[in-house]
Image: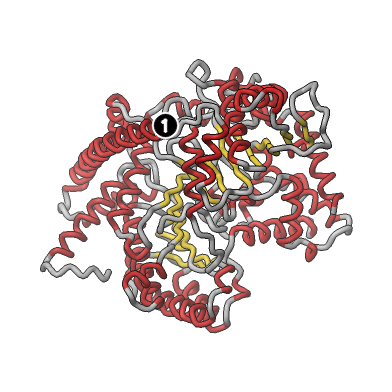
Amino acid sequence: MSKIQDTVLKRQDDNWRENEQDHKRVPAITNGFKNPGKPSVGNVKKVLETAVLVPPNSEEVRRKLAQRNKTGMWGQSGGRLEYAMYKTLLSVLLVIYACVRYAQYEYNRVKILVLNLAYSPSNTPQLIRQDVLKLQKLPRRLAAILEKKREGDVGGGVSGVLNDGSELVAWSVSAGIKHLILYDHDGHLKRNVDDFRNNVSHKLSKFYDPSNVPRFAVRVPQWNKVYFNTPGAEVGAAKKVAIEISLLSNRDGRETIIDLTRTMAELCAQNEMKLSDITMKLIDSELTQLVGHEPDLLLYFGPSLDLQGFPPWHIRLTEFYWEQDNDQVTYSVFIRGLKKFASCKMNVGK
Amino acid sequence: MSDTNSFPGLPQVFNFFKNLFSHVLRTSNNVPQHIGLIMDGNRRWAKRKHVEIKEGHNAGFHSMSRALELCYEAGVSTATVFAFSIENFKRSAAEVDSLMNLARSGIRQVVQNGEMAEKFGVKIKVIGDRRLLPDDVLQEIETAEEITKNNTRAVLNICFPYTGRDELIHSIKANIDSMSSGQLEASDIDENQIDKYLYTAESPPVDLLIRTSGVTRLSDFLLWQASRRGVVIEFLDCLWPDFGSRQMAWILLKFAFNRSYRASDLDFEEETDGDATANPNKNHM
């Protein structure tokens, strides 16, 4: 069925080149503007204002309120009063929540700080090796969701994403993970693939002896391209690489599934394919070819889990790991994710 | 439902506060519209309590009623529960049997004397690959759907037997089918079109997914729906039978707070709602 793949790839290529859909469709990054988990008095005040002053706009609520007016527990005249009371109680609840949340946030931040101190790889693969050797199993394929932070922040902008990505590559190489999937919603990584390769090589030469930097391959499934090492140093493509990195974006998720559907629809219309040919196995193998294999572990470096449009077909049994209220790509999250993975038991359906 | 509080009057007081809470939350206008539930941990709970696995599933059923009661009362319009995965057919025959029995009696209970159907006007829908079910269970399901079909207040989708990939393939096939019958052009197939043929097509988009028992996987549940940006995914450490109104209330409050927080954060709104035309400077790379 390589015909299917060709058509899908061609379609993606066209989209990319002709209307540069990615540039248009993709909304700007939302997270990381500031740590959304971070509470502040001003924001709590604003929350209360919106919660109390904005009237409910759903039909359901209005109907319920009208109904309550008649039969409410506060009698005939109590409708408005009751509503006001509910709103007051709501703000009380939200304030209580904000207080608890604030304590929780501070606790988590301190925890993250301590963990960051406890696990610091300081650019030495040996230390990472030592951490990993204690683990019973390693993920064969590791995925990570990266986010672009606000331009001007520490580690913000596209260069921040590139830096985070290359750090993850260095840790993975040191840990002995052979496949790494880096996902960022807007595709910053694949659009700057040359910079990324330079970045990775730079980072790896810090970890390893410059004469013996591990080789790597960068795969961009959307363009069906594989790049070896840094630009200008592609020699040795045939030699074994220490790690294969796939760069994914929102485009490789739903859009690819839709492209696949269209292609199969066209083939069916031309009678080259029957509806009964479409099976779980076929779709799985097509999507594996087009996007890649399902990762075993997915790391997320934001404050609360949000899959950001990660390819839906590829998260069937993937283990997720993230650290509450964390907003940085740090080694402690990486190694704690691996530890969690090593300790979890997998039993499909049972 | 089966709160075994020994202190007289306590259940009533508890109920009063529960209702009050849900009504208060309802006025916040920031309640999730569609909740997905993975009710994991019934068997481990049974083992820990040294009772039969059947008892565990029973306790899980009650736990579900408690949680849903609160949700519907707070204004959630749809809940989708993962009752049985296609993969679950791999379990021992005895257990599959007892699960089927539970489903049969559970559905009957909900429909006949369970307060849920009457009090909340819940419409029950069983989604998934129903061809795999035994005939008698299928009949029970059809009766239940028939009886509750005119309820409009809330919807309960029971995934039975279901997997997310199976649902996706179902939709892909349905799309291709409707194209070959001439209702659709190949170029019309897009995300909405795929959504339209999912089992959850008639429901609002999923905005909250809860899984208990400390497992941090989706296990093939609502893959397409939950991978969207902005869907809140909560993984809890407690086992499902221990999941009560308190946990549910906390999650709903958290959800409401975060949504109000975002609504009040103007920067955020600009960033999420604005597409290329609203902030073109963001798209220059």
Q: Is residue B231 visible?
A: yes
Residue type at mark 1: give it. Asn
Q: Where residue A87 sits: x, y (%)?
A: 24, 40
Give left or right: position of A106 versus A329: left
In this view, A26 is above or below B115: above
For the image, the number of numbered tags is 1
Q: Where residue A32 sits: x, y (%)?
A: 47, 28
Q: Residues within 10 Å of mark 1 (few under 14, many from 20)?
A: some
Q: Where residue B78 sits: x, y (%)?
A: 45, 56
Q: Chain of mark 1?
A: A
Query: What is the image's colouring?
Result: secondary structure
Residue at which label 1 appears: A116
Q: Choose between A209 and A58: the one closer to the eye.
A: A209
> Which image quarter holds the N terminus of chain A?
bottom right
In this view, B150 is above or below A227: below
Give left or right: position of A87 versus A302: left
Kindly state the secondary structure of the residue where label 1 is placed: helix
Residue at point 32%, 45% (across, down): B253
Residue at point 73%, 32% (across, down): A215
Residue at point 47%, 47% (across, down): B207
Q: Where residue B240 sits: x, y (%)?
A: 38, 62
Q: Choose between A69 and B262: the one closer to the eye.
A: B262
Q: Is residue A220 visible?
A: no
Residue at point 63%, 42% (across, down): A177
